Amino acid sequence: DKEEKDIYISLLKKNGEWADPINLGEIVNTASDEISPSLASDGRTLYFGSNGRPGYGSYDIYMTRRVGDSWTQWSEPVNLGPEINGPGFD
């Protein structure tokens, strides 16, 4: 669906140009929307919002960790729970 929102990364090349965007893959991205990505300072932990997974509200916040050096291999996203996610848009 062209209307869905997925998370991509684009890396800065040595020559100062941006590489082509890389879709983070089906572990992170669903057939619905993934939004507001935030990569932690460790370069491996990603927080993002999604309405394509079971949750507490319309959009919940999830956490996943990059596996190895690939940008397309991630741990199964974990919902941050009802302490963070309420019944609305989080």
Image (spheres, grey):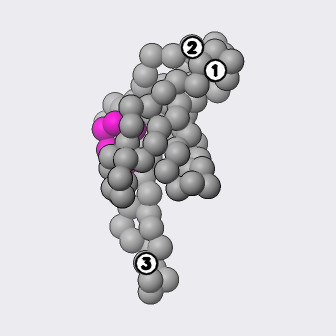
Mark 3 burial class by Cα count in 10 Å: few <14, some 14-19, many 20+:
few
Image location (x, y in percent) of residue 32: 40, 30
Q: Secondary structure at mark 1?
A: loop
**Mark 2, residue position:** 56
Q: CA distance from mark 2 to mark 3?
A: 39 Å
In the image shown, does 21 or 83 lie closer to the viewer? 83
Q: Is residue 86 above or below residue 49?
A: above
Q: CA distance from mark 3 to mark 1?
A: 37 Å
Q: Using a 10 Å C-alpha cutoff, classify the residue at mark 1 as few (fewer than 14 neighbours), some (14 to 19) or many (20 or more).
A: some
Residue at numbered disc 3: 13
* Magenta: main secondary structure: loop
Residue at 63% across, 15% down: 82
Q: Residue 71 location in percent, x, y? A: 37, 54
Q: Amino acid at mark 1?
A: Asn
The correct choice, above or below, for 45 with respect to 33 in the image is below
Residue found at x 44% / y 63%: 10
